[in-house]
Image: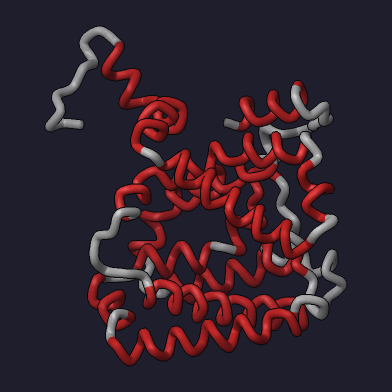
Amino acid sequence: FEGLLAAFRVWVGGEELEGIWLDPHWAMWFLAALALWRLVTPVLRAMPAALPVAVVVCLLGGLTTGDVLDVARVMGFLPFFTLGLLARPEHVALLRRPGARLTSAGVLLVAAALAPWFSPRVSAEWLYWRASYAELERGFVEGAAGRLGLLVLSTVLALCVLSLMPTSARWFTPLGAASLVVYLCHGFLVKGAEYAGLGDVLGAWPLDGLLVTSLFGVGVALALAAPQVARRLDVLVDPVPHLRNVVPGGRRSNQEV
């Protein structure tokens, strides 16, 4: 996907790219992060204080930009991965309680009301977890305190969202199996829209542009996650099982699949 998206950006968009293989561009950072997190998973599982250690790593990550394999983001988001890794069904069950759901709805409403006030006062770079404290014009103490506060706030809001997620199967539940297909393939459509100049057109009417962009995003997600589409694109996203089915002697039974 690094090569496919790079070729698309160069041949279709006329962009000039450098160092894409060690410095994943655009959405590809997440694949590098997944690979590195998977490598440290055994260590985290065996570590009694895995979550505090992950928080310390996150705070120290603000000392460097870490462009190689986007290691800065890997360190910055590590506490979220660790929290999910250590979570148990009984922990999630606590979020499903009626009182927890009511509280979560209230917290999200308050956060939505305060977001417009914070937006012009805080750089969005804090939310990408990739910029160093020096780039954010902060010293270590101030930067680490800000990152720690953001870490707590982000965790609370994420738990609130999880609390409100439906527990029963809905019509859109099966679409979640194609989430990685949607994530990796939507970039071609977004970049194509950018090259077509739709951003400038929609930017002239902010409210209409927001509505059109939102509908476009939902439409793209539903289209890419549709079983007929996702099944074919999954050959690119997860090629190994498909190769086993076409290589002589590598075919597996449906039960094994």
Q: Residue at x 58, y 67 (%)?
A: 57
> How has the structure been colored for display?
secondary structure
Number of labelled discs? 0
Q: Position of residue 250 (x, y in %)?
A: 24, 15
The vertical placement of 49 against 215, above or below, is below
Q: Quadrant of the N terminus?
A: top right
Would you say 17 lies left or right of 23 here? right
The vertical placement of 72 against 142, above or below, is above
Q: Residue at x 36, y 25 (%)?
A: 240
Q: Position of residue 96 (x, y in %)?
A: 29, 80
Q: Nearer the viewer, residue 58 or 214?
A: 214
Would you say 46 lies left or right of 59 here? left
The vertical placement of 155 against 221, above or below, is below
Residue 141 seen by the camera: no
Q: Quadrant of the C terminus?
A: top left
Q: Quadrant of residue 184?
A: top right
Q: Quadrant of residue 88?
A: bottom left
Q: Position of residue 126 (x, y in %)?
A: 72, 69
Residue 191 seen by the camera: yes
Q: Position of residue 192 (x, y in %)?
A: 70, 34
